Image: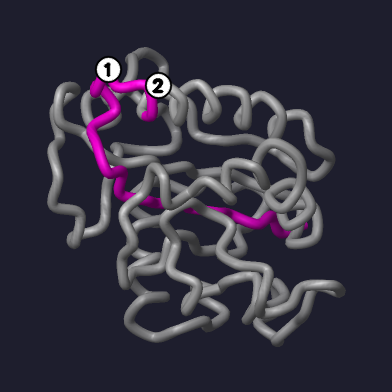
């Protein structure tokens, strides 16, 4: 049975290593959000580094999720001291469970604060695509799908909640999703929702 892959990407206003209270708040809230989402029905897995601390995305061993990659338009640092991004890569059973997890509870609270932490960009902040049940998506594939979404809009290859597709490529809708729901990822541009 196909599974839903989700890649998210946002550019932070300050590096993850910044000791300011706002950066610490983002990081602490992010850890709590990960724990909560990991317990949500329909969540299957997310990319986790085998080692590494705050900001060590590029040097970390991501196992089957592949080498860490970012969109070409990301222009901030790549060292532990300068990395200013938040990215996730996860697998879900379907669109409804992902939507319910993202727009509820602690993650919803984080969405409401996204502009405290993230720069506003003209790029999409998230992308979905379907994978077969034996596939683990890679960071590079997530970047490629996000860039495809930016260049071509929602298609069966790369899509959003508001213009989504079933595994067979036919357009589909999630009951209760409207254009005013906003982006599911901090830093995402509402025009891509």
Q: Categorize mark 2 by other alpha carbons within 10 Å: few (<14), some (14-19), many (20+).
A: some
Residue at 29% x, 28% y: name it: 16
Read off the residue under disc 2: 24
Q: Position of residue 37 (x, y in %)?
A: 70, 35
- As helix, strand or loop, the secondary structure at mark 2 comes to helix
- As helix, strand or loop, the secondary structure at mark 1 comes to loop
Q: Which label is found at residue 19? A: 1
21 or 108, which lies in front? 21
Residue at 61% x, 29% y: name it: 34
The residue range painted magenta reads 1-22
Q: Which label is found at residue 130? A: none
Residue at 76% x, 58% y: name it: 94
| Occupied quadrant, residue 5 | bottom right
Q: Is residue 147 above or below residue 141?
A: below
11 or 93, which lies in front? 11
Would residue 55 be counted in the magenta stretch? no
| Occupied quadrant, residue 78 | top left
Left or right: 110, with 145 as reference point: right
Would residue 13 be counted in the magenta stretch? yes
84 or 41, which lies in front? 84
37 or 29, which lies in front? 29
């Amino acid at each position: 049975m196909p599974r839903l892959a989700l890649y998210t990407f946002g550019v932070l206003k300050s590096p993850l290593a910044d000791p300011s209270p706002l950066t610490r708040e983002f990081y602490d809230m992010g850890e709590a959000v990960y724990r909560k989402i990991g317990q949500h029905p329909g969540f299957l897995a997310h990319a986790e580094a085998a080692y590494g601390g705050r900001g060590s995305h590029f040097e970390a061993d991501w196992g089957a999720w592949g080498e860490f990659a970012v969109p070409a338009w990301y222009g901030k640092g790549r060292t532990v001291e300068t990395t200013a991004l938040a990215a996730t890569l996860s697998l879900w059973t379907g669109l409804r469970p992902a939507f319910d997890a993202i727009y509820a509870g602690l993650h919803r609270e984080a969405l409401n604060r996204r502009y405290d932490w993230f720069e506003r960009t003209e790029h999409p902040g998230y992308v979905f695509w379907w994978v077969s049940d034996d596939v683990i998506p890679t960071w590079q594939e997530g970047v490629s799908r996000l860039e495809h979404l930016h260049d071509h809009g929602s298609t069966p290859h790369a899509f959003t909640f508001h213009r989504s597709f079933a595994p067979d490529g036919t357009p589909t809708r999630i009951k209760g999703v409207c254009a005013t729901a906003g982006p599911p990822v901090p830093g995402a541009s509402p025009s891509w929702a």
